[in-house]
Amino acid sequence: METNIATTPFGRRPMTLGMISSQVTARAVPRDATVHKWHVFQDIKDARIALGATDRALAILDALLSFHPDTALYGDSELIVWPSNEQLIRRANGMPPTTLRRHLAVLVECGLIIRRDSPNGKRFARKGQGGEIEQAYGFDISPIVARAEEFKNLAEAVRSEKKAFRLVKERLTICRRDIVKMIDAGIEEGVPANWGRVQQAYQAIVGQIPRTATRQTLEAIAEELEGLWTEVREALESFLKTRKVDANESRNGRHIQNSKPDSKFESESGSGDKDEAGGNVADTDNVRSLPKRELPLGIVLDACPNMLWLVKGGGGIRNWREFLAAAEVARPSMGVSPSAWEEARTAMGEQKAAITIAAIYQRQDQINSAGGYLRSLTDRAKVGKFSVWPMVMALLRAKLDASKATGNGAEAAAVDLETAGKVVRTESRLEISDALRRSLDKPRRGS
């Protein structure tokens, strides 16, 4: 007795090495093997990319497995199903016939099923007198049993890789978050370090992260970030230990030494805290005789020409509003925290605070902790011992000295300094302090 179930048209299908390999594997299945078909199917889904299967192909495999009545598949049983294309299409959510045939070929090529074609190419089962199936033609799903252990191992490897990928992404996220928080804490607390350079190093490492990356790439970037994390942490801990030994050191502006010669931090020994962006502290403390009027913008820009680098499009700074905008750009690039900037603006006024930022920016290569230095000047401003005039005068004097040394622009620099001096000397009923007069009038060495 013969029952015709399918109407697949007869046609020759090419034999491939993958199909031959699948047939060999299927014949080698142990007779006593037993697997849960849906557990194996889950392993196949997890290892889909490694097997080369597609999502649509797995949807068809899901449908094929559903045509087998038993959940448990045995190595000694007949494992052939013979659904028609119409039945497969219905269970595969209305997949077009051409797509169905294409993805059936993918399943065969991946060794997940084997074609058992009848002489006329149709799918059907031949039953005996007792209703038992004697011969079936269709799709053999015995590779599900034969390769169950292989699918399980592949799935476990894929899951392990996914877990490792997830863990390294978590490492990156936590490390990035911690570094940003520690940098903010260092700036907020005035910890002496070149925080601008640390931020640049952090951005350089983070900038290496591609949109799509392998686990190995992320591992390498995570190691770089953890190295930076260690340096920032050591700097903060070293500062805390130093402050415990002598609590006055942080207030006096002393700075910790970093034991790593190639670290991204710098010690601040030297004249960074003693010289006010090139001006002597004694000059700034005696501010009672300094001019009360505001510094002209032209003189400030002559003393701090580096501020022009911060103007978009390379244009000039035409008014105080544009100067304040440039100061807002310079502040974070030097690692000055928002709280230190707000405190300086409150103590000095917005315009004088911007001039102070400009002076620090002009000499940032000589100042290791711009944020800590600004806080120190802010503290002086609060008790009336700070003025921006000596800072600007000192920068103009340094510009004149440099021009004389190179022989270029000495005359223009002298005019700038003379103009600033006239502003000071023409203040009505003003007695200039001896310190400022010495700064303006006394000849420098080599002049």
Image: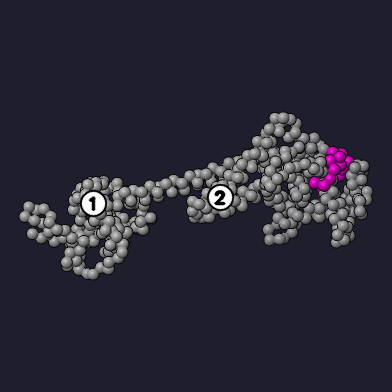
Would you say 303 lies left or right of 77 here? right
Element on which disc 1 rests: helix
Q: Position of residue 284 (x, y in %)?
A: 84, 41
Between circles 1 and 2, the one closer to the viewer is 2
Residue at the spot 79% in from the left edge and 37% down from the top edge = 380
Q: Which residue is found at the position 78% from the left and 53% from the top? A: 304
In the image, what residue occupies the spot 50% across and 44% down? Answer: 170
Q: Nearer the viewer, residue 250 or 155?
A: 155
Residue 305's disc is none
From what the image shows, is residue 123 above or below residue 161?
Answer: below
**What amino acid type should be assigned to the residue bearing mark 2?**
Ile
The picture places residue 101, in percent across and down from the top left corner, at 27, 64
Q: Residue furthest bottom?
A: 12
Would you say 411 lies left or right of 79 here?
A: right
Numbered label attached to residue 221: 2
Picture coordinates of residue 317, whole percent (x, y): 74, 56
| Bounds of the magenta segment | 276-295
Image height check: is 185 above or below 398? above
Q: Amino acid at mark 1?
A: Ser
Q: Residues within 10 Å of mark 2 (few under 14, many from 20)?
A: some
| Label 2 element class | helix
Mark 2 and mark 1 in contact (Cβ < 8 Å)?
no
Can I make out residue 238 in this image? yes
Majority SS type along the magenta span: loop
Q: Position of residue 215 (x, y in %)?
A: 49, 51
Q: Front-most of 170 and 341?
A: 170
Q: Which residue is label 1 attached to?
A: 66
